Image (cartoon, rainbow, N blue to C red):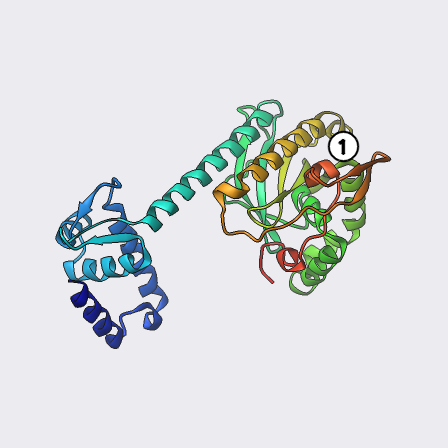
Amino acid sequence: MVGNMGRRSERLSRQGVLAGEAGEGDVIQVVSRAFDVLRCFEGHEARLGNLEISNRCGLPRSTVSRLTHTLTRMGQLVYLPRDQKYRIGPSAVAMSASMMKGAQLRSMIRQRLQEVAEQLPGTVGFVVPDRFHLVYLQFARSATALGLHEGTGSRISMASTAAGAAYTAALAPEVGDTFIADMEREAPEAAKILRPRIEANRQSLREHGYVVACGLWSPHINGLAVPIWSPQYQTFVVITIGLLSAMYDEQRLHAEVAPLMLALGRSLGSLLEGAEGDVFNNRIPRKPVAMAVHNNNKPINSEGVNDLEAGTRRARPARSLRAGDGRR
């Protein structure tokens, strides 16, 4: 059986069926079918032959045979010669466990966002950078939320939001300046909004640990955002909230909203740090950088605390921050 599968793989390679010669659409189809095969193994103890898999997922037996051979080589399946069947492999089990832990982490993040949302009539979001935009990964809002209704997957501008202001302010100055220079070349109108505000945003972050943006995204919306260092993304993520300006002016943001968002930032910062070794196990290791900074004229040693508590930015490798999304 194994010898036959090897000869079949060689024949397919000569015919140009393997991914190296396939078009993008073919590759997508192959990946989709591979997941169809893996979904047939509902339990880790399930043992299935090619015919049984073919019947379950509705694919031709010849296609299933090619897929099971490839998945076996990848460790997603294990071939049992005595039974001439397959069972789920160690790589698939590990991937499943990792995905479950990731889902648990996202659920805990959303729960903490919701706790703040229940106290404020706005939308609280957890966003990650995507070049010159940010994307909502999680959000929460109360039943009485007014004004801003972003949802998971929504993209917002880096230049005209509190979240973007906080993210760019959190970058080391030389990295942030390079980022804005890139924006000036590729998105000049956005850069015109961000460039004049960057120093004030950096000062606000140093002094308060957050950044506010009033009427920038919309004249009716005021926002506040807190950046958090994420070991998973090797860059800063941001928690942000948008509220109706008629209800929450800048003074009220500082007095009532900031304490809740700072506490949320500390909570999520600890959560992300604690998840580092469990949920994402292929990151670049990093060491904390000891540095003395000032927050409300009180020196704080940032070693052993997160970036939010330090109220400033740690130096990070430029390759992980330059584009703000992991790209160079």
| Label 1 crowd (10 A; few <14 / some 14-19 / many >=20) | some
Q: Is residue 304 left or right of residue 293?
A: left
- Which quarter of the figure is the N terminus placed in? bottom left
- Three-letter amino acid code of the residue under disc 1: Glu
> Residue tagged by mark 1?
250
Regarding residue 148, the answer to whether it shows in the image is no
Q: Give the structural element (helix, strand or loop) at label 1.
A: helix
In this view, the residue in front, 297 or 220, is 297
User: Residue at 58% across / 27% down in the picture?
Assistant: 117
270 w.r.t. 156: above or below: above
User: Residue at 45% across / 35% down in the picture?
Assistant: 104
* Residue 46 place in picture, x, y as percent: 21, 42
User: Residue at 67% across / 57% down in the picture?
Assistant: 317
In this view, the residue in front, 259 or 194, is 259
287 w.r.t. 319: above or below: above
Q: Quadrant of residue 127?
A: top right
User: Residue at 26% across / 73% down in the picture?
Assistant: 13
